[in-house]
Amino acid sequence: MHPFLSGIITIIVGVGSCVGYFYFSNLILDKVIFPARGPNTGRNINRANQWRPWLFVFPAVFVLGLYLVYPVIGSFIRSLYNRSGQEFIGLGNYATLLGAAEFRTAFLNNVLWAIFVPALTTFFGLVAAQLTDKLSWGNIAKSLIFMPMAISFVGASLIWKFVYAVDADIGLINAIRAGLFGSEPVDVLQIPFWNNFFLMFILVWIQTGFAMVILSAALRGIPEETIEAAVIDGANPFQIFFKIKVPQIMPTIVVVWTTITVLVLKVFDIVYAMTGGNFGTDILPSYMMSFMFRDDGRATAVAFVIMIVVLPVMISNIVQARKEMR
Amino acid sequence: MGTIAGQKSGLSIATNVAVVAMVLIWLIPTVGLLVSSFRDRDQISVSGWWQAPFSVELTFRARAGVDGVKDGDDWVVTGNIFEAPEVQEAFGTGAGRVTGFSTSARTPGEFPVGSPADLGDGESLIVNADGTYEFRSPEEPGNRGQRVYFAADTPPQFTLANYRQVLTADNMDRAFINTLTVTVPATIIPILIAAFAAYALAWMDFAGRGWLIAAVVGLLVVPLQLALVPMLNFHNKVGIGQSFLGIWFAHTAFGMPLAVYLLRNYMVGLPRDIIESAKVDGATDFQVFTKIVLPLSLPALAAFSIFQFLWTWNDLLVAKVFLPSNAESKVMTVKIADDLLGSRGGDWGILATAAFVSIAVPLVVFFTMQRFLVRGLLAGSVK
């Protein structure tokens, strides 16, 4: 059967069984298990209402538990075994990783990514948000800067291949260099160390729109009076921006910053499509994929390292969420 | 706002210039891709896409005609080189201009136009800028005309040939359908599941609710790399293996934290009065959810479905792991990253076209639904 057809059937079956589950489970709860009649009507209604929330959250909790909670433990356990999964080797995989030069490169590159991508993205997003707000054609500008959000990492990598290509008839950078300075073409993706930044810029290019949209909404939410007061006191536009506006939207800046930091630790597509991790550009997610299907033990060990790196963000998010609920 | 009279004009010019520069940087690479995808393959390799509207000097190979006319002792063949069947396609309606010619492949533009070139054995050839030529030879021309190599400015050529090839010959049509097959169920099913859960977390009171919400917030940042190995093993164990069914489950689960989080944030903001008065009137939770909360949450549902759609359509990692790696089940991102970038690394026209085919649908969705997308982003991060 063609997968497209089975896709349609899946939609019908999937949606049907979801709706069916919610409908019939409620029906059974109300009519069969705790019927709202007979001597215990009142008690039964209360008991049914105690159980109902769990009917509603069960499918979500089930998939979350299976696909996101169990793997944290499952991956950790798997990372303690060797390649074939037969032999327990303790922290052997982690020791091997620490000894491997490629891992250290990937880790250090990842640190660079985690510092520069969120910083540059937030900076560009903030600048774009502030500047476009004042323009009559600001919404069009925003829309165009936001557009790369819709493009896949692979698509974006390809787009930037046309900028970075060595051939001066394809690559914009080398064409400009040749046109202005008459210099020989260089492969920017092979310049040691700096090639990382050329790759990072692709992600910055994709994510700036996201930062801009959120920061722009935050900027608009700033109470007008604070700015008016600053104007009356003689503050210039730069002072208003850095001393009045930025401090007031700091919480939003932190949210944007952490969201992008977490994203950076997931994205393997750009490195995979642009350099395949060669020329010293590997990062942890792409390094992990080089072991996927070959050595599950080491792949899970790398994944767990990523998890450890993300852990502080996760904890602070949970603490924040608990605080807001009180 | 926030400007002082007298500074305004200078600052606003600077603002305009800065935004124009930024928009250009953000737009130009994509425009380059789009232009390249419509260009003729030969032209791509000789001139950058920014020169696409201008003519390009290319070299061609053609044969002169064979219909000789006796002129004194010599046979003379005349004609227009642009009309030779080999090169006709590149020039269309005589818009080309010859810049040089020869009879050797190594030096295609050796002789300047308009002056006769001595080919030895008493033969001579002259080609003019407009393409007309005159070939003189002491012998009667055989049934094969004289080889002519020439360089000519060719008019800009835009063609759909790349699209034709990508969509028919390269299995990209199959990949497109596969992507669609992955995307649609993986967008619809999580919304349904998440909506019920979000309602319970927003409007139903039960023990452990706070912890569940905190767990969802925590799971938002769990790197999905962790799930790859254990879940693939699990799929293999329960018999799903690498299949579309497996990737639907995976995408459903990976999208779930964001879905629950976004929808709950939105539903919590709905007016309490409506929901409580419905309950007073005897509506059950199921009815309140389907008849009141769900219709009111449409903007949030739309926002999440756009996210999930873009994410699943653009995903490479999950597809590489949870789908089989044979040609029939490749989605577009895998196809581009693994097949085209690897084996067709130099075929820029095909690469550009394939990339554009894969980003066209998300771009349409993006530009038509941008309103909802922005609203969804804001619901997720600004309090």
Image (cartoon, grey):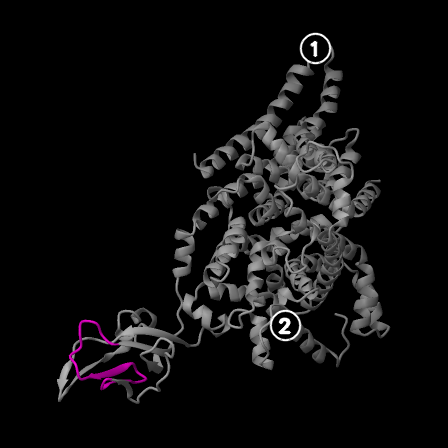
The kind of residue on which mark 1 rests is Gly
**Going by the picture, which residue comes out furthest to the right?**
A233
For the residue pair A78 and A315, the one nearer the viewer reads as A78
Q: Position of residue B313 (x, y in %)?
A: 55, 48
Task: Tell me if residue B133 is in the magenta stretch.
Answer: yes
Kindly identify the residue that appears in the image at 65 percent across and 38 percent down.
B229
Vertically, is B361 above or below B90? above
Note whether residue B125 is visible: no
Note whether residue B51 is visible: yes
Q: Position of residue B328 (x, y in %)?
A: 46, 42
Image quadrant occupied by the N terminus of chain B: bottom right
| The quarter of the displayed image where residue B240 is located | top right
Task: Tell me if residue A291 is in the magenta stretch.
Answer: no
Vertically, is B266 above or below A197? above
Label 1 element class: loop
Vertically, is B210 above or below A159? above
For the residue pair B39 and B262, the one nearer the viewer reads as B39
Q: Are marks 2 and 1 on the same chain?
A: no
Label 2 element class: helix
Kindly identify the residue that appears in the image at 54 percent across and 38 percent down.
B185
Q: Residues within 10 Å of mark 1 (few under 14, many from 20)?
A: few
| The quarter of the displayed image where residue B59 is located | bottom left
Q: State the extent of the magenta-drawn residues as a range.
A: B121-146
> Chain letter of disc 1?
A
For disc 1, the marked residue is A38
Left or right position of A156 against A99: left
> Chain letter of disc 2?
B
Q: Position of residue A251 (x, y in %)?
A: 80, 55
| Structural distance between the alpha carbons of marks 2 and 1 | 75 Å
For disc 2, the marked residue is B21
Kindly identify the residue that appears in the image at 42 percent across and 58 percent down.
B163
